[in-house]
């Protein structure tokens, strides 16, 4: 069922829209968590570290996919907000073509460059094989990942955040089942974890596309919808590419951080990997509300109601800051309990197991303190993207990259592992400052334009 985000109380409609996304994010993080837990407990801590090493590269790929599909979704949300269903179908068709071409390019580049990037990162010898084995399967499954995310963004653009949830739950259950089959029963290790993810996403993409075509008549495509228009392709790329690049430049910073982390023992890499997975769970509610405000802003911007966009941002900010208090408190109170999910009896018997708990706990403590800046990023970045202002989110991403580059080079040499854990935090602060200032300057400009129009009436 689609939800018209241009009507009703802001807190109510944003919350109702966000709840399925939150549940979906929980399932998504859970099956990613299960991947790591099953690998850590059934393969080795080197295998867990291998997943961590590949995280930066997979985030680069998946981040690009999330960025470009979200941008396409905003174009569709704006058309839906205007009530222009013919444009909505053309936007959907344009998005599918652009995303298909992008998937082919990413697959080719990933297959060629993965090995070189892992070696450039200085991946430890006892970790390299696990990292490459996982990464190459994910790369070859990019088409499935792109297809699933494109259909999910199209459905969210028309206010339907429930259907992507249902198919994400399905995907999560299939993924966990295949994890147990491939890793525990068949002994395929990290290759099995990656293969389970790809298969689950491919099935979800096929089923969700079929459902969308059956349920929503105004999304049913015909051959004329695929007659690409230069101005429409340009507009989709104008919004989609900066969002994709913004995710990607952040992930380049994560690759640099991982390269600095690879100088430490595998126990530290494993602990950092566990903490990073836990941090992602702590941020998932804010991520969901970020998705909500992007589509809320897109629909209301398309309807010409900037005052409602502003109210929606305020409502979203209030909600996510309340959530931030809960998330930070949990990380401060129970860091070892979260980390222990990744440590089996064999790992617990290691003489250096304390390094896993230390490295994870230190990162979780610092994350809890700086979480508010990350939550601000989710709100203001997505609000700007929703109204088509993609320049400043891209600039914030580039600033994050610059900070990570400098910090990855300097801080580990100055402060050791403590320097590693501060890299993310400094990047969050820099990006949050840029996005908050940009949002209020742009909103003030729209307010001035509105006052001028009112004076001329």
Image (tube, grey):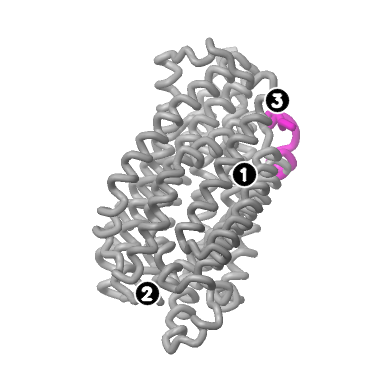
Q: Residue at x 71, y 31 (%)?
A: 2
Q: Is residue 6 magenta?
A: yes
* Mark 1 closeness class: few <14, some 14–19, many ≥20 residues within 10 Å: some
Identify the element where label 2 is drawn. Answer: helix
Report x, y in % for residue 439. 48, 40
Question: Viewer-proximal residue, 342 or 256?
Answer: 342
Q: Which residues are magenta?
A: 1-15
Q: Quadrant of the N terminus?
A: top right
At 34% from the left edge and 54% from the top edge, which residue is drawn? 253
Q: Relative to residue 180, is residue 376 depicted above or below?
A: above
Look at the magenta stretch and give its main secondary structure. Answer: loop
Residue 321 shows up from this direction:
no
Q: Which circle's residue, 1 or 2, is located before the other in the chain?
A: 2
Q: Kindly give the residue lying farthest to the top in the view shown.
A: 224
Say left or right for 383 vs 166: left
Rendered image: mark on residue 230: none
Q: Secondary structure at mark 3?
A: helix
Q: Which mark is residue 266?
A: 2
């Amino acid at each position: 069922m689609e939800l018209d985000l241009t009507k009703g109380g802001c807190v109510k409609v944003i919350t109702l829209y966000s709840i399925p996304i939150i549940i979906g994010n929980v399932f998504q993080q859970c099956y990613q968590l299960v991947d790591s837990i099953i690998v850590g407990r059934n393969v080795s801590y080197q295998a867990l570290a291998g997943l961590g090493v590949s995280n930066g590269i997979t985030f680069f790929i998946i981040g690009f996919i999330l960025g470009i599909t979200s941008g396409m979704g905003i174009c569709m949300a704006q058309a839906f907000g205007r009530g222009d269903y013919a444009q909505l179908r053309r936007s959907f068709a344009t998005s599918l073509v652009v995303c298909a071409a992008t998937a082919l390019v990413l697959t080719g580049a990933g297959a060629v460059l993965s090995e070189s990037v892992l070696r450039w990162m200085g991946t430890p010898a006892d970790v390299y094989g696990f990292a490459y084995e996982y990464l190459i399967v994910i790369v070859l499954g990019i088409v499935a990942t792109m297809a699933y995310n494109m259909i999910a963004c199209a459905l969210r653009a028309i206010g339907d955040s429930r259907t992507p949830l249902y198919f994400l739950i399905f995907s999560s259950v299939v993924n966990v089942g295949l994890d147990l089959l491939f890793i525990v029963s068949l002994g395929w290790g990290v290759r099995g974890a990656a293969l389970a993810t790809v298969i689950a996403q491919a099935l979800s993409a096929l089923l969700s596309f079929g459902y969308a075509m059956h349920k929503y008549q105004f999304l049913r495509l015909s051959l004329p919808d695929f007659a690409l228009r230069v101005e429409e392709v340009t507009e989709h790329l104008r919004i989609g590419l900066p969002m994709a690049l913004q995710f990607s430049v952040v992930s380049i910073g994560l690759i640099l951080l991982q390269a600095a982390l690879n100088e430490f023992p595998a126990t530290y890499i494993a602990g950092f990997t566990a903490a990073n997975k836990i941090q992602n769970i702590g941020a998932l509610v804010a991520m969901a509300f970020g998705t909500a405000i992007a589509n809320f802003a897109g629909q209301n911007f398309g309807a010409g109601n900037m005052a409602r966009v502003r109210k929606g941002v305020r409502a979203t900010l209030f909600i996510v800051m309340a959530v931030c208090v809960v998330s930070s408190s949990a990380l401060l109170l129970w860091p070892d309990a979260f980390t222990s999910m990744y440590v089996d009896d064999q790992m617990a018997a290691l003489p250096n197991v304390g390094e896993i708990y230390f490295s994870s706990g230190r990162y979780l403590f610092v994350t809890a303190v700086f979480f508010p800046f990350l939550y601000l990023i989710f709100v203001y970045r997505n609000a700007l993207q929703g109204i088509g202002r993609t320049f400043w989110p891209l600039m914030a991403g580039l600033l994050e990259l610059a900070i990570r580059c400098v910090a990855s080079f300097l801080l580990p040499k100055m402060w050791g592992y403590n320097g590693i854990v501060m890299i993310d935090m400094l990047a969050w602060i820099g990006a949050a400052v840029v996005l908050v200032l940009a949002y209020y300057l742009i909103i003030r400009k729209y307010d001035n334009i509105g006052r001028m129009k009112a004076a001329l009436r």
